[in-house]
């Protein structure tokens, strides 16, 4: 499956772009997480990375489709 992944915050630096096309064999958000960790090991250092699919936060068991819009949302701090 080929998925377009949009990256925000520190994820943009880790992926090296605001958006990347990612080819992977899985179908779940969990599979996408594993593929991201394999191709971009620094992703694993983010202790609370959220993934949104079609503008809604996604659980790891959500089934992805090629037409989905996926976004990586890193931990945010403020004050």
Image (cartoon, rainbow, N blue to C red):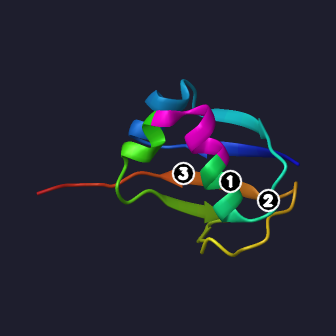
Can you tell which quarter of the image residue 76 is in? bottom left
Residue 72 badge: 3
Q: Are marks 1 and 2 in contact (CB under 8 Å)?
A: no
Where is residue 8? Give x, y as percent: 48, 43
Tell which tag, 1 or 2, sits nearer the viewer: 1
What is the number of callouts on the image? Answer: 3
Give the left or right position of residue 58, taking residue 23 as reference: left
Q: Residue 78 appears at what percent x and percent y?
A: 17, 55
Q: Decide whether residue 64 is among the magenta residues.
A: no
Residue position marked by numbered label 1 in the rendering? 32
Dot 1 or dot 2: first in sequence order is 1
Q: Position of residue 40 (x, y in %)?
A: 55, 33
Q: Which residue is mark 2?
A: 68
Q: Is residue 49 left or right of residue 24?
A: left
Question: Which type of secondary structure does the marked residue at label 2 adopt?
Answer: loop
Residue appearing at x 75%, y 38% in the figure: 22
Pick whichever, 9 or 1, lies toward us: 1
Task: Name which residue lies at 11% across and 57% down.
Answer: 79
């Amino acid at each position: 499956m080929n998925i377009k992944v949009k990256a925000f915050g520190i994820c943009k630096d880790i992926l090296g772009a605001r958006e990347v096309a990612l080819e992977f064999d899985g179908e779940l958000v969990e599979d996408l997480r594993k593929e991201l960790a394999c191709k971009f090991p620094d992703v694993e250092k983010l202790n609370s990375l959220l993934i949104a699919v079609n503008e809604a936060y996604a659980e790891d068991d959500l089934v992805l489709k090629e037409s989905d819009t996926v976004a990586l949302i890193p931990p945010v701090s403020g004050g």
